[in-house]
Image (tube, rainbow, N blue to C red):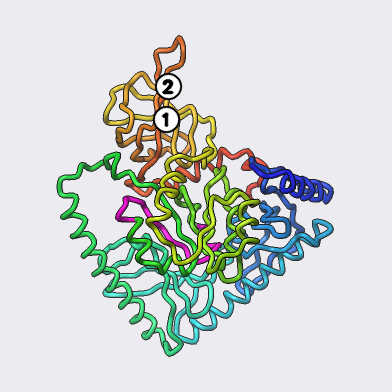
Amino acid sequence: MPNAEEARRQEVILRRLVAMGLDARSLPGGRSVVAILPLGSAPFESVWGDQRFEAVRFATVGVDRAKCLSPRPLFHLPMIRIVDCDDMASIEARLRSAWSSRVRQLEAAAVWLEKLGFHVRRDPSQPFLELPIEVEGGCFTATVIEPHRVVLPAVGPLSGFPLGRAEDRQLEVDADCESATDLELALTVRLEELARLGERLAREENARTAERPAVPTARDAGHHILLVGPRLVDNKPLIESLRLRGYRVVTARSANEALRTFETASPELVFTDTRLGRSDGIDLIPALRALEGMEEIPVVLVDDRARAELREAARRLGGAGYLVHPIDFPKVEKGLVKLVSKPRRRRFTRYPHRVSVRWGGCDQPGHTTNLGRGGMLLATLGNAEIRSIDRYQISVAELGETIHVDAEVAYRIRAPGSSQVGIGLRFVGFPDDDEATLISVLSSLSPTASNDGGSARR
């Protein structure tokens, strides 16, 4: 819970935003304020097409900055300073200035690509440039935000090896790359390296799990951890230590990339470097909790040297811990286990929502009474043992789709006078990459979704 001083700060911010005429509210926990800012009719200009947005939804970060949450093109902008803004017009002016800076960045990237010989397709609705690459008769699309940095797609065509880790997808292009052929060669070499790595890892995994059932066992149902920042991303011994202990690890080099991770996945714990280029790791604490479907995700700050003032600042913002590089994993392992397995509070919002659920271990279908990013509460006449894991099919009628998820039974309850059992389930995996669909469904259940005005909804 926030201390009294922090609560007063957020109350002041809330009153200021409301006094400006914004639709604003405090998030649960009182550490951030979410507001909806109506925008003027002037378009957000770029050289390849103008954009018009009716409103933007943002969350305060600390006492001085704001992070855009929706619509999508504005979500990818850096944080803007609002502490010295006196009215809605001044906040909008800062937002438009950030947009102009991003447009200039994309224009520089477009010039770089065209100089290499690429035909760049400009889409004003996308916060990046799409770069089609043809290799071995196939074609895939990479993305570019700034010169000399290419982000590979999630799957490479050379082997079909999924590039799930953020560091796999980033390619820093050398300055001596002078043509489209040079860049295609660099991308091809990188994909081939990843393909060989993927084949080796797959062989090793197959050898270890030849007898493993299709659905993971409770022992293998590792918690999902996000590492943010170059020093953590490049700390291979730490990553391997986590994976050897069964944790599922994803990485992000920047704050924006970390926030984008939560559009398609729901890590349960975040470790972040204090220095993230143009932003600070400490800002991730309120920014993450401002995302839809989040509640109080634990964030551990990792500093390059011990600083008492930063440790205290992280504590005031609700940080779960403060460590110093290099991380002595044996010393922090017990604390890590406590953070991921015994949360002080729920990490994700639970929405009252009823959808049909079936699973292989029971002939009786059930229905959800609560649904969230990390799990669901299921009402059923069937039975499921504590710690057992099964594959569940969640029928989403409004989408006409079925979401498949592997889930572990965390607890069981029985309502007095009812023959139904309540089964608390923790999600441990999405075999068909359905997690993004689930997050989209949950976003539509958010109380703020109906206030976004269509174009301001992520």
Callout 1 secondary element: strand
Q: Residues within 10 Å of mark 2 (few under 14, many from 20)?
A: few
**Which residue lies under the disc numbered 1?**
424
Q: Is residue 458 at least partly visible in the picture? A: no
| Quadrant in the rendering for residue 50 | bottom right
The disc, 1 or 2, on the residue closer to the chain's N-terminal end is: 2
Q: Residue at x 51, y 57 (%)?
A: 260
Callout 2 secondary element: strand
**Which residue lies under the disc numbered 2?**
413
Is 294 left, or right, of 383 in this rendering?
Answer: right
**Residues at discs 1 and 2 in contact (Cβ within 8 Å):** yes
Q: Residue at x 43, y 66 (%)?
A: 233
Q: Is residue 288 at least partly visible in the picture? A: yes
Q: Which residues are magenta?
A: 243-260
User: What is the x, y in percent for residue 316?
Assistant: 65, 51
Q: Is residue 251 magenta?
A: yes
Disc 2 marks a residue whose amino acid type is: Ile
Disc 1 marks a residue whose amino acid type is: Gly
Is 359 left, or right, of 33 in this rendering?
Answer: left
Q: Establish if 95 lies above or below 407.
A: below
